[in-house]
Amino acid sequence: MYDLAARLFPICRSITGDGFRQSLTMIREIIPEIQVFEVPSGTQVFDWTVPKEWNIRGGWIKDMKGNTIIDFRESNLHVLGYSVPVHTTVSREELLAHVYTQPEQPDWIPYVTSYYKERWGFCMTERQKQQLTDETYEVCIDSTLEAGSLTYGELILPGETEDEIFFSTYLCHPSMANNELSGPCVQTALIQYLQSLPQRRYTYRFVFIPETIGSITYLSRNLETMQQHVKAGFVLSCVGDDRTYSYVSTKYEDTLADRVLANILKFHYPDHIRYSFMQRASDERQYGSAGVDLPVCAFCRSKYHEYPEYHTSADNMDLISPEGLQGAYDVMVKVINALEHNRYYRMTCKCEPQLGKRGLYPTVSQKGTKGDARYMQDFIAYADGRNDLIGISTMLDIPVDRLIPIKNQLLEHQLLTIA
Amino acid sequence: MYDLAARLFPICRSITGDGFRQSLTMIREIIPEIQVFEVPSGTQVFDWTVPKEWNIRGGWIKDMKGNTIIDFRESNLHVLGYSVPVHTTVSREELLAHVYTQPEQPDWIPYVTSYYKERWGFCMTERQKQQLTDETYEVCIDSTLEAGSLTYGELILPGETEDEIFFSTYLCHPSMANNELSGPCVQTALIQYLQSLPQRRYTYRFVFIPETIGSITYLSRNLETMQQHVKAGFVLSCVGDDRTYSYVSTKYEDTLADRVLANILKFHYPDHIRYSFMQRASDERQYGSAGVDLPVCAFCRSKYHEYPEYHTSADNMDLISPEGLQGAYDVMVKVINALEHNRYYRMTCKCEPQLGKRGLYPTVSQKGTKGDARYMQDFIAYADGRNDLIGISTMLDIPVDRLIPIKNQLLEHQLLTIA
Amino acid sequence: MYDLAARLFPICRSITGDGFRQSLTMIREIIPEIQVFEVPSGTQVFDWTVPKEWNIRGGWIKDMKGNTIIDFRESNLHVLGYSVPVHTTVSREELLAHVYTQPEQPDWIPYVTSYYKERWGFCMTERQKQQLTDETYEVCIDSTLEAGSLTYGELILPGETEDEIFFSTYLCHPSMANNELSGPCVQTALIQYLQSLPQRRYTYRFVFIPETIGSITYLSRNLETMQQHVKAGFVLSCVGDDRTYSYVSTKYEDTLADRVLANILKFHYPDHIRYSFMQRASDERQYGSAGVDLPVCAFCRSKYHEYPEYHTSADNMDLISPEGLQGAYDVMVKVINALEHNRYYRMTCKCEPQLGKRGLYPTVSQKGTKGDARYMQDFIAYADGRNDLIGISTMLDIPVDRLIPIKNQLLEHQLLTIA
């Protein structure tokens, strides 16, 4: 995962354009089954319109002696996202009106965009701005903003049922690592994991989109199907650092997505942070919006907005790690595993079954000798058709992982049935 | 409000009689539309009977030398409420059997009544009682207790719908200020406020009644209509001091009255006190009684029973203040405002609308630049037809006052509809 | 109760056999109406099979000089429950493979059984085991394990309705006092109490069974009837010591049995311990199992598994006391009383009734004079047909005992009716 992120890192992506396409192609080298869709600029998508396509080749500020002050080639964050082209000489005052910095983080270049109002601009560190003391500068942004299309990738892995688990991540940010190459890289690995499974109960839907306009576009084409089939979904974002685990609940905190994430994180990383829907800021905004109301949580390690490097040049390859990505991947594999086994179970016999005669219970009764048989007895008691596996795990305070073999043993002995 | 209270203060009111009528007349000088009803003594009202009408002209105790010990003219609390007439000479011992004091508050005259058993009696300070050392006294109460009627006032301000908001206060106490001239004075001001509004969605029902027997009488005549139409109601009592805000919940704490009061007080005065229905003691007892079950809370500043001056001569014009009355009035205006705007809202578009193109959202995207647009986004997310405005305010922890302009902007842009 | 326990103590009981029969006969001397049932060995009862009948006459270990090391006559715990007969000479090593001790409680003989796998064995104190230093021993267990039957006792006390309250206790343990002679003794006293009542609303069902296999057997014959009629049930176990009170909730903690026990113990012994269903270990396991789902709690003083003497020779007649048994009995009498009076009540009049004219309320109104009339007013408010008596008691925080006379007064005055 880390290597894929490293290869993707230098590309200048945006919500449209060749940087996005090139990145998606790199992922399709691993997962060729991903389908690519192009949606023309100007297409109406709910209340929004697909914007013009933006491409950029370079950009710089020079002083009048020809010295380069900043250059897009050093960091693609230096050019305001979606800048219109410009090549002119401007006064210091005029330039400063087009300069964006993050003054409280004076050594980092901020990531700034203006997708829906045509502007040009440069982003730089506060210190760089302080050194703009000349009277006049030459500025150049070699970009195009023209009719084109918005690109996204989709993969549907069919399962035994039409019920779907949905994963969404976004590929529209330029050179930033945690936000957001970690999500696409973990998602790519999850697809490989699911492709490797001998069978899948659920159908899995994956999308690689530009943030916000991408999810709106995608929903405008798939909403009815998704409302009918999606049982749980996850936005993968900022899943590459080592600091914590967190998730953003759905609006009413009661969906299968909330339940399974809460359950897995409770055992995997008890100190994880749960954010309410009020703290949402990525595509879960659209998936949970009024009238869409899909059961989609966001899953993060250190959540967007909550870590200092967020949306700056400091969100680089040093911020993420193979271990950080692997940790997030492991949680999602546990989530998938819990969902695949998550049925309502019911015992086939009245009263407790006689486990002893099946070798599932000690035959000598003395205090302190029950051990793990207790877990089986507790599972049996709650397998009354009212609870799914995740619910039983939460009530019994036993990880789903430990209940699955118990459940399987009982199914083998025909003591259990799916309710 | 304070001036009206000052003018009403000297009058000796009771649950029936000319004091009540005279007070109601004084209020009708401000609100002539209030209708006056007279219910004859002996009328059966549910399990109760309208009592005889009581009027009093004077009362005193003198020693045998003719020195006045106490006199009704000094404080109308000196005569037991509903005392039958008496003029006789009594031994000290016999007198004491008719004397009421509040020994733990030795300088204050308690307010005592005997509405439903015929007695005569005097109330005085404990210190005054200690000085009754003569062997014999002359006592006189110049009252009448005869067939007459119970008086109450009612005003119905029609609105766009038949759904009603109900306000009830009582005017049956003699010279006490917080309990209870504050309630009638705030209610009078609220009527003026509502009359001044260009339109009202709700119909408003106001009553000025004697406590307990008055609400029972009123309910016996209006119960069916009220059960059909009243959506929220408030007993206004003890709303004139400066100490705190409080309210008494309904029985199951789940009505619109509970929800709006809890919401408004949470933002207006976070340290307010919520009393359970077990602490009820005014007309909310009847409105919330089994079989009546109207959604009516009591609203107070320092609640009856809870402040030391309650039901004594110390509950005088010094205990209440213009600011105290104004504060209670302000809360009730906020309550009315919240109720008037309290609809279930639903967005007209799927996904988030594009606020930027309507000038409702910043067009440059940089961390930390969203500001108040966040409130609009959160309102939009929860405007899914499941929540009313008060519910959204409580969930988002944003005062209704701040959501109303947001809601209005969205309605203007036709992004929002009433569900 | 203590005397009955003392008489029962020496008998060696097990889940089948003459010890159980003899004990039940002793109880039937007090309650001759108890019916005795014999279920043949080999009978299929749900997933289980009624085992062979076990009887024992003696058992000992001797050294080769003929000195008795341990003897069943000293403690019937010395022989492993359900031991097959044996009489042979064994090496020290071979003997130790058949010896059970509780090493962390070195002076106590543990209580150990092997009902469902044929074994022979001896239980002894850890110190006794340490002294087995000879090379060879003679061992003898004079038992029989043969086709026979499982014995249980049942008593049904009919009431005005077919709705049932169920009590279950077990009589299958050898010489241990708290666990379990206390349950049968308290249950015997409760039957006498219920027989003495002039009338009973509920029908009462009592069983004296062997643990686990007994409740499974009993349910296999009575499940449908019990699912139809049992409204609340209680397993009585470990109810004889003086240390605390406790109970084990049902699976979802929401049944009438949970509600009444929680209510009674809240007032009777506020420091009682509530265990979740996860801590179950007696017949409530079967009554609450998936597919059975009867509303049955376990009631204990110090709960099984939770006190050090549990399942050892230290659980003797010193551990229980007449006061301990009486305390548990008193709780259950309160439970029965609360259940007998537990109806949904509704006031017959709208608004509060005029209690004063019926002598139920003070006729002078002065602050601080209401006293107990307050309880009646609160009961009246909540007697709106939505709450049963236990619910009202819990909401008002007033014991059921104090509400019953209030309820009766209101019924007498025809102010109240059963909803």
Image (cartoon, coloured by chain):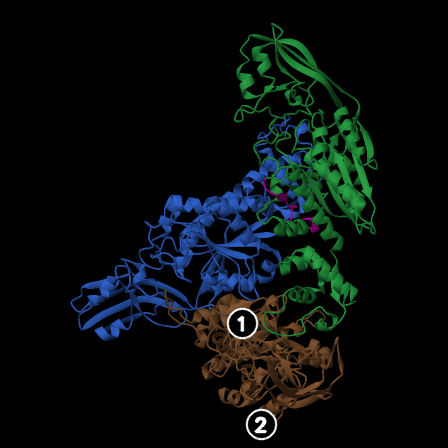
Chain colours: A brown, B green, C blue
Where does the image place residue A253, in percent across and percent down from the top left?
60, 66
Where does the image place residue B198, in percent across and percent down from the top left?
82, 50
Tell which circle, 1 or 2, labels the residue nearer the N-terminal end: 2
Question: Residue A103 shows which numbered tag?
Answer: 1
| Residue A237 appears anywhere in the view | yes
- The one nearer the camera, A275 or C262, is A275
Stretch of the chain drawn in magenta:
B243-257
Q: Quadrant of residue A369?
A: bottom left
| Residue A354 appears anywhere in the view | no
Where does the image place residue B18, in percent across and percent down from the top left?
77, 24
Q: Which residue is mark 2?
A: A29
Real-space Cα separation, disc 1 to disc 2, in angstroms: 41 Å
Question: Residue A392 shows which numbered tag?
Answer: none
Q: Three-letter amino acid code at disc 2?
A: Glu
- Residue at far left of view: C65
How many numbered marks appear? 2
The quarter of the picture where the C terminus of chain B appears is: bottom right
Chain holding disc 2 = A
- The one nearer the camera, A282 or C246, is A282
- The one nearer the camera, A180 or A290, is A180
Specify whether residue B330 is painted magenta: no
Q: Is residue B98 left or right of residue C8?
A: right
Where does the image place residue C6, in percent across and percent down from the top left?
35, 48
Above or below for B230 versus A248? above
Specify whether residue B245 is painted magenta: yes
Report helix, strand or loop for mark 1.
Answer: loop
Q: Quadrant of residue B291?
A: top right
Above or below for C40 versus A149? above
Residue positioned 67% across, 60% down in the render = B392
Above or below for C180 versus A402? above
Q: Three-letter amino acid code at disc 1?
A: Pro
